[in-house]
């Protein structure tokens, strides 16, 4: 399995202090920062766009894992690349031409991720895996932080891991010290955690325990 990466979801941070919150997470052991981009159309919520990524990029060199919960993901590739996004993860449900989009993202200089919602069969990404850097298996319905982890998404992670031993597999939604064992055993190695890290008394302890569970 590829190495563990812990990616705190900045959706749970205080957006008014984004740079300080990012530094706090990095200091506490975060490998990546997970940036949730929502357009109020693909999901029933609005969060941030490329201008916020651009502002944050001025304060840190950390890997920015951008999760695009948007319709027409083709439209924002260049803006996110210019803003300093490290990885552009689009939803398979949001495009009819995933292969062209993957090429567009690579050409723009970013790593590529493909995300699947809980009800989307994982086989839809199988033909794309050799062209991408990461697959994101949602473990809640996208749209909001603080929801309950859905263990019934784990067979998808398992099947991906069996078929693609070297792939970065990210899980997102409801990950905590209570749910990490299930996700790690299924084969996930990139762990997004919003509420469980930001609301913790010691984010450092939570991040290091999440990492240990993936590595064990
Ligand atoms: C949900 C987002 C997640 C969310 C995770 O649509 O994609 O990244 O912020 O937050 P928690 O860990 O609180 O479920
Ligand atoms: Zn996310």
Image (cartoon, rainbow, N blue to C red):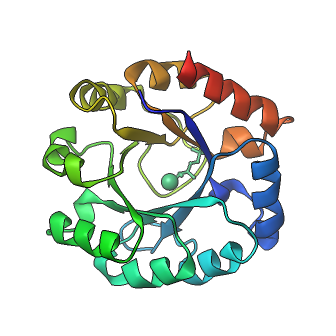
- Residue 79 drawn at (x, y percent): 46, 84
Write the residue at 78% across / 42% down. 199
The relative height of residue 47 versus residue 168 in the rendered view (above or below) is below
Q: Name the side, left or right, on which 104 lies relative to 36.
A: left
Q: Name the side, left or right, on which 108 lies relative to 123.
A: right
User: How many numbered tags mark residues here?
Assistant: 0
The relative height of residue 161 versus residue 58 in the rendered view (above or below) is above
- Residue 67 drawn at (x, y percent): 46, 60
Write the residue at 54% across / 33% down. 4
Residue farthest to the top, as pictured:
216
Q: Name the side, left or right, on which 12 lies relative to 128.
A: right
- Position of the N terminus, as image quadrant, is top left
- Position of the C terminus, as image quadrant, is top right
The relative height of residue 107 versus residue 215 in the rendered view (above or below) is below
Camera sees residue 115: yes
Write the residue at 24% across / 70% down. 103
- Residue 163 drawn at (x, y percent): 21, 29
- Residue 159 drawn at (x, y percent): 24, 27
Camera sees residue 177: no
């Amino acid at each position: 399995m590829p190495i563990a990466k812990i990616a705190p979801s900045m959706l749970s941070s205080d957006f008014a202090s984004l740079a300080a919150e990012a530094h706090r997470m990095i200091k506490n052991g975060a490998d990546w920062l997970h940036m949730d981009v929502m357009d109020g159309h693909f999901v029933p919520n609005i969060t941030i766009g490329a201008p916020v990524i651009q502002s944050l990029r001025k304060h840190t060199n950390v890997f920015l894992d951008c999760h695009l919960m948007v319709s027409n993901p083709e439209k924002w590739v260049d803006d996110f690349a210019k803003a300093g996004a490290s990885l552009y993860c689009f939803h398979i449900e949001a495009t009819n031409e995933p292969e062209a989009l993957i090429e567009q993202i690579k050409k723009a200089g970013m790593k590529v991720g493909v995300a699947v919602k809980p009800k989307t069969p994982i086989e839809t990404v199988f033909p794309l895996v050799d062209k991408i850097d990461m697959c994101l298996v949602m473990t809640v319905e996208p749209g909001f932080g603080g929801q309950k982890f859905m263990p019934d998404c784990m067979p998808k992670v398992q099947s991906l891991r069996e078929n693609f031993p070297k792939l970065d597999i990210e899980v997102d939604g409801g990950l905590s010290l209570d749910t990490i064992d299930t996700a790690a055993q299924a084969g996930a190695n990139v762990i997004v955690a919003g509420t469980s890290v930001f609301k913790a008394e010691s984010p450092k302890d939570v991040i290091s325990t999440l990492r240990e569970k993936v590595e064990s």
